[in-house]
Amino acid sequence: MSAVLASRFLMGVATLAVGSMPLLAQAQAPAPIKVGVALDISGPFAAPGAEIRDGLNLAVKLLGNKLGGVPAEFIQADMAGNPEQARQLVDRMIQREKIDLFTGPVASNVALAVGPTLFAAKVPYLSPNAGPSQLAGAQCNAYFFGTSYQNDSMHEAAGQYAATKGYSKVVIMAPNYPAGKDALNGFKRLYKKPLADEIYTKVGQLDFAAELAQLRAAKPEAVYIFQAGGMGINFIKQFMAAGLNKDITLISSPFTADEDIIPAVGSSMVGLFNASSYAHDLPNAANQKFVAEFRKAYNGRYPSLYAAFAYDVVMNMDAAVKQLGGKVSDRPALVKALKSASFDSVRGPVKYGNNQFLIQDYYLRKVVQGADGKVTNQLQPGKVLTAHQDAFAGQCGLK
Amino acid sequence: MDPTFFLEQIFNGLGYGFMLFLLAAGLTLVFGIMDTLNLAHGSLFMVGGYVSAAVHVQSGSFMLAVGVAVLATVLLAALLEALLVRRLYSRDHLAQVLATFGIVLIADDLVKLVWGPSPIMAPTPAQLSGPIDLLGLPYPSYRLLILGAGFAVAVGLYLLVNHSRLGMLVRAGASNRAMAEFMGVRVSKVFAIVFALGAALAALAGALMGPISAVSIGMGEAILIPALVVIVIGGIGSVRGAFVASLLVGLVDTAGRAFLPPLLRELLPPALAADAGPAIAGIAMYMLMAGVLVFKPSGLFPARA
């Protein structure tokens, strides 16, 4: 070995030694709590994924990177809405990072794909969005928490609203895939009356000319739609452009009328009704704080329900860790603490049912042009559903 | 069902047909003249949509947006032709499909790099965002604009192909390339012009479709399949065939989606009808293609005898 190489080698060793010193020092402090966050930053769910990320990051910032006063590390990674990629990511998070808690995915198929791995490793999974009926019913699991809502429930609330309004001629419409069918079944469950028509569209369809003509011919009093993302934006734009809003009341799922969609459609959405378990103008202290901080952090934007539920997920974790005094290694105790933890939800009073899905209230929102000129959702007086539990809780074996 | 429902479906079908024609015309000319299968044609459609949406948001002028989109796409297509497609003439269809499919993948990634992964919204021009009264039917005024534009392009292409010198060379090249070359037509030069013209039509279609369907990655692949169906039905290389087939496919697809589900609900139990209706409506255009090919194996108006 030449002298130059030898000196380089020694320098390398020295650098390594210096570099690892903070690691050694850290080893004496309590190990941070690790939270795996699988996000949809790209792919078909990029828009709700970004909302979840923003709500979660805000909660982490407000808690000073701590959960229950204990330092916490949030390991965020993009899985692009792909169940297979998500499963690999979760494997890595469990094996290498030894995560204590998990959250993130938008889509129900991803939740179903990563669930078994997490349950086997006894890692509690708090869902900020997906609430598939399987995990609410027969396949419910002590390690899964539906901190968001059960998939059918938002549509049940819409059905209840349509029934309360006394609409007798209603057309309902959704894409022809499992979530679309669940949505329409949810609507029918509480609407109860026979429907004028039930229209299924192709998944990813963006031109609704044929369906709008069917609507015009059916002449219903109201139409309920569940169309996610770009499909919803297009449907609403085309509905307005065809002048159908003059004769037909459009009721939407909250996903098609949330703060991430409204800017894309603009003022033609004004007057649209939708039911949701969250509204950014709910008058409780936790929500007022959340919305003020959210608008401060993100250029005056109002939070969507995705952001709100992600925020609640972190607050739920925080309350549970506080209750345990930071001892997250006892997993059955952690699950119990997560379930019983009293955190101030931005939705007001909530509690977990036997299947660990939240029992919560559902409100009516209406898209309005606010005093500041911004088009946004406004909470309407009264509740659509109070302390509503999902329809699948009875099939769950958990006590 | 009332007559306005039929009227509305006919307008919708024609509108979709004209859009397909804008795409299929370029595709069939390129395929017909140079025997080159260009899958990247859909990507040119996508570029037109993105550029138009971006310019519209920035400048607020829809006309300017469409103009810039067409110009930019033509320049891009000229570059593509000079750098890659020109080298593919003498290769077989497999090589052409592989190479142009590579372009599709690259184009999708480049668009993702520039505009991000989520679809972008192409605004509808404000004057055209409401309905217009049409024989008692309130019809979206923007869709009427599309109908008008599609019709104007069809007439323009008819005149160009059937009553101009360039058209004569194009027809000669399409019906018998070897003979045309023998007679002194520089087919490769004609082809470069046709390629650019096809790109302009694709970009126009993309720019016009933007406000109706969101502008998103993969929109080119989604529309390329019906466009290929159209040129197969119409007869490869025939602009007239592409025109007739576009309107046929547009009308059949729209009719399938509008009439089939309600019809099936009358005949079948609701759960089965909900599954079968959209599925059959989705394959209606392929059934049309199969039906036509049984009787006319080389399409309705074969360019080559």
Image (cartoon, coloured by chain):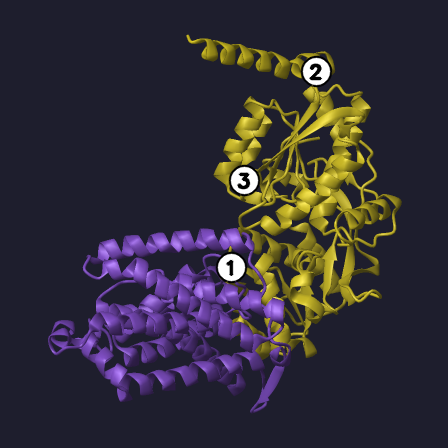
| SS class, disc 2 | helix
- The residue carrying pointer 2 sits among few (fewer than 14), some (14 to 19) or many (20 or more) residues within 10 Å by Cα, namely few
Q: Which residue is mark 1?
A: B216
Q: CA distance from mark 1 to mark 2?
A: 47 Å
| SS class, disc 3 | loop
Residue at 65% x, 44% y is A129
Tell whether label 1 touches label 3 (CB within 8 Å): no
Q: Which chain is purple?
A: B
Q: Quadrant of residue A218?
A: bottom right
The residue at the far front in this view is A3
Q: Residue A236, percent across and down?
A: 63, 68
In this view of the protein, can residue B277 be seen by the observer?
A: no
Q: Amino acid at mark 3?
A: Met
Q: Amino acid at mark 2?
A: Gln
Q: Chain of mark 3?
A: A
Q: CA distance from mark 3 to mark 1?
A: 20 Å
Q: Which residue is mark 3?
A: A79
Tell whether label 3 touches label 2 (CB within 8 Å): no
Q: Quadrant of residue B285?
A: bottom left
- The residue carrying pointer 1 sits among few (fewer than 14), some (14 to 19) or many (20 or more) residues within 10 Å by Cα, namely many
Q: Residue B16, percent across and down?
A: 44, 75
Q: Residue B160, percent across and down?
A: 31, 84
Q: Amino acid at mark 1?
A: Ser
Q: Nearer the viewer, residue B80 or A104?
A: B80
Q: Which residue is mark 2?
A: A26
Residue at 77% x, 31% y is A318
Q: Which chain is yellow?
A: A
